[in-house]
Amino acid sequence: MLMTPSSSPQNLSILAELERKVLWLASWTIHHANHVRDSGDGLKVGGHQASCASLATIMTALYFHTLRPQDRVAVKPHASPNFHAIQYLLGRQTRDKLEAFRGFKGAQSYPSRTKDTDDVDFSTGSVGLGVAQSLFSSLAQDYVRSHGWGLARPEGRMIALLGDAELDEGNIFEAMLEGWKQGLRNCWWIVDYNRQSLDAVVREGLWERYQNLFRNFGWDVVLLKYGALQQAAFAEPGGDVLRCWIDNCSNQLYSALVFQGGAAWRKRLNDEIGDQGPVTALIERRSDDELARLMNNLGGHDLGSIMAAFDAVDHDRPVCFIAYTIKGYGLPFAGHKDNHAGLMTPAQMDTFRKSMNIRTGEEWSHFEGLEHSPAEIQAFLDRVPFSSAGARSLQAERIAVPEALAVTVQPRMSTQLGFGALLNELGRGDTAVAARVVTTSPDVTVSTSLGPWVNRRGLFAREALADTFKSERIPSTFNWEFSPKGQHIELGIAEMNLFSVLSALGLSHVINGERLLPIGTLYDPFIARGLDALNYACYQDARFILVATPSGITLAPEGGAHQSIAEPLIGLAQDGLAAFEPAFVDELAVILAFALDYIQRAGGAELYEQNWLRDETGGSVYLRLSTRPIDQIKRDMTPALRQAIVDGAYWLRAPGPNCQLVVAFTGAVAPEAIQAVGLMAEDRRDIGLLAITSADRLNAGWTAACRARERGLIHARSHIERLFAGLPRHCGIVTVLDGHPATLAWLGAINGHRVRPLGVEHFGQTGSIDELYRYYGIDANAIIAAAQVIAPGRPIRYLGAA
Ligand SMILES: Cc1ncc(C[n+]2csc(CCOP(=O)(O)OP(=O)(O)O)c2C)c(N)n1
Ligand SMILES: [Mg+2]
């Protein structure tokens, strides 16, 4: 064991006091939220006290002893009050926030990077995701440092505190496999092995399965099973028998005896291993309280053992600590299988308070009830390495992005091909933007058109790996060479990992102080596979560009299983993600330039009057693209058109004053919309053709403008309201996209126009694009048929002709 300053006996006794303080403050915070502060909504939710108690020792050891400012931690969701309590003791959390725990603008129920103010590294809440986040953050750190950035700062360890039941989440294993492939380092996972989940006690022998799994993936595994008291008892005569009994005791029984306490332990142990000899003597030498303390003294509740285990790691290999703990340790419901939502009653809390020597009214006091003097404790806290460097959230300069990105637009091309061409051009240049772009894809690099970019910029690996096909002179379109300078991270197929890695790369500016511009590609339908991880990435404000292609039924012969319908609605609804679906490549060039800048913004939340969006706050971007080659429009990109594309729509054909009909389309169905308008032009007056590049931004701007008007800003007008300003009330609107029709159906709510939304509600059929568009009703004829009904007039003569 390394003798660091804080593991001296004096410091150990201060740490033991701090451990009690953390347990107290976390328990009190939860109690206060439930019993003292009354929100009036009748919601009394526990779900924290037992889990906090389980991790109080480990977190005390970590934060007050082991961690350095450069280390980053994903704290498991229910240990949030421990985290806030520790930050409070370190002077980084306010009493007001603790008093408002779970309340409006109070400390958050689960640690939140964006909503908490006490320096949360990674948000958690949806179990499993924070764990994977720590792994991929380690990879992101390696990426940054391999490129020669941030070397002035020490390398950090990426740590996750996780529950034993959390390991049921499959994404953790997907991440482990990827970590093994990528040569994971500097990553610790500390499993709170309390053998309880939310509902019950977990299966026997799980630790062994975990141990084998982790070792298989190249991790060191450290078991923290017995505390110092137990180890001392094992050395006494008869101790080996006690140890054997502990090892064979079922999780259920151990938990039940923990709950029942000393007398129950005595009875059971005497019944099962009492020998009227050394074992009985070992038991009888201890009072009930001492016996309970001995049996509760598992590795995860022994400060000294935990600190020693952490101190002993002198390498950068990934380490999994399996720490035996007791859920509810030190609290009246310790070990009880129903304790997850358990809350101490006011009477129990009072007893607990007295046992902690805390006077009524002094519950929040930092030093109340501690034996060391406030000056001693404060001096210790002032020396805690973790908080010695001030704020740990970093910042990075913005990289200037040119207003326009170069691309040669072919007369006929798809947006996916356009994306490949744009990145190829970007990769050709020696710009700051190109240097900071990092692409990643779950085994669909080539099929999403990233190949040319990868050929130019190479694949990333900490150690160089040549492309054997190249060295063997076998012709291949793709140069698959890995090096520490490569700019593409090739992932296995798991989409969860794509979003987790985007989340990690997309936080590099705050975690590593170095800006990255991450671009991830995948097939649009598989967004659903990683959706929770995408949501999580957005929740913690990671910044990235997601390129999803191919999409919809437009990938036609590729098959039903790959068709996506709901994704445009995800784009519309997902907070923190601006969704675009361009039809033409020049639009895409504008949007990509905007996106590269937008993901770097971190400005105020003022509404921008042009579109009523909070554009200065920035966010991530989702581009839904297509493999369908379509005729491109030759035109000059004027500033006004550029702005309209970014704002979400422009008139491809402006409606006349007596407009009877508007056709509004998004994405790959542009040719059908254009054709239909051409065929109807003689039978309906002044038809307008609206190209929608972002239903999401149009919708967000409109709802924001509505709210602004409701607050009295009567002149607030969103982009879509300006576009619709001249439309007669009686005209009908036919909307069409290769996605769920509800994406655009809301357009009728703006001014009360009749809308017939066309789109795709069912999927699963292969065929040609023409066949499928006809079958699902998004071809030109379907548009005309809809128009005929919604915009009455003389029969449209070309109905049935398209
Ligand atoms: C994805 C997801 N599913 C379900 C939940 C609800 N949930 C919160 S904690 C938990 C189980 C906790 O067990 P464990 O990880 O062992 O922690 P402990 O209760 O022992 O502290 C569950 C199911 C969640 N937060 N996230
Ligand atoms: Mg558990």
Image (tube, rainbow, N blue to C red):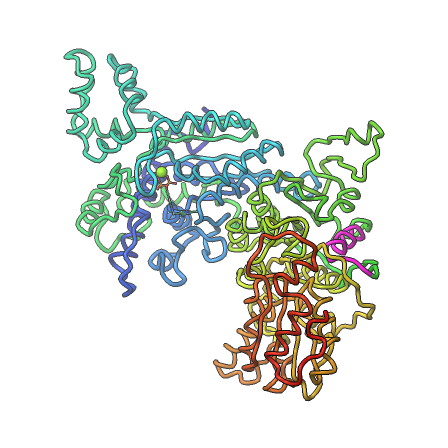
Instruction: Examine the rendering and report whether any part of residue 86 can be seen.
Output: no
In the figure, 74 relative to 640: above or below? above
> Which quadrant would the N terminus be assigned to in this image?
top left
Q: Where does the image place residue 773, in percent across and percent down from the top left?
A: 66, 61
Which quarter of the picture shows residue 331?
Answer: top left
Q: Residue at the location (33% across, 58% down)?
A: 99
Quadrant occupied by the C terminus: bottom right
Relative to 328, is 506 above or below?
A: below
Q: Of residues 491 and 45, which is closer to you in this image?
A: 491
Magenta span includes 424? yes
Within the displayed image, which quadrant is ligand 2 positioned in?
top left
Q: Which residues are magenta?
A: 412-426
Question: Principal SS element in the magenta part?
Answer: helix
Quadrant for residue 774, please give it.
bottom right
- Judged left or right of residue 67, residue 460 is right
16 with respect to 490 (left or right): left
Give the mark count: 0
Which one is nearer the viewer's eye here, 458 or 651? 651
Inspect the magenta stretch and tell me whether residue 30 lies in it. no
Expressed as whole percent of the image width and height from the top left, the position of residue 682 reads: 74, 82
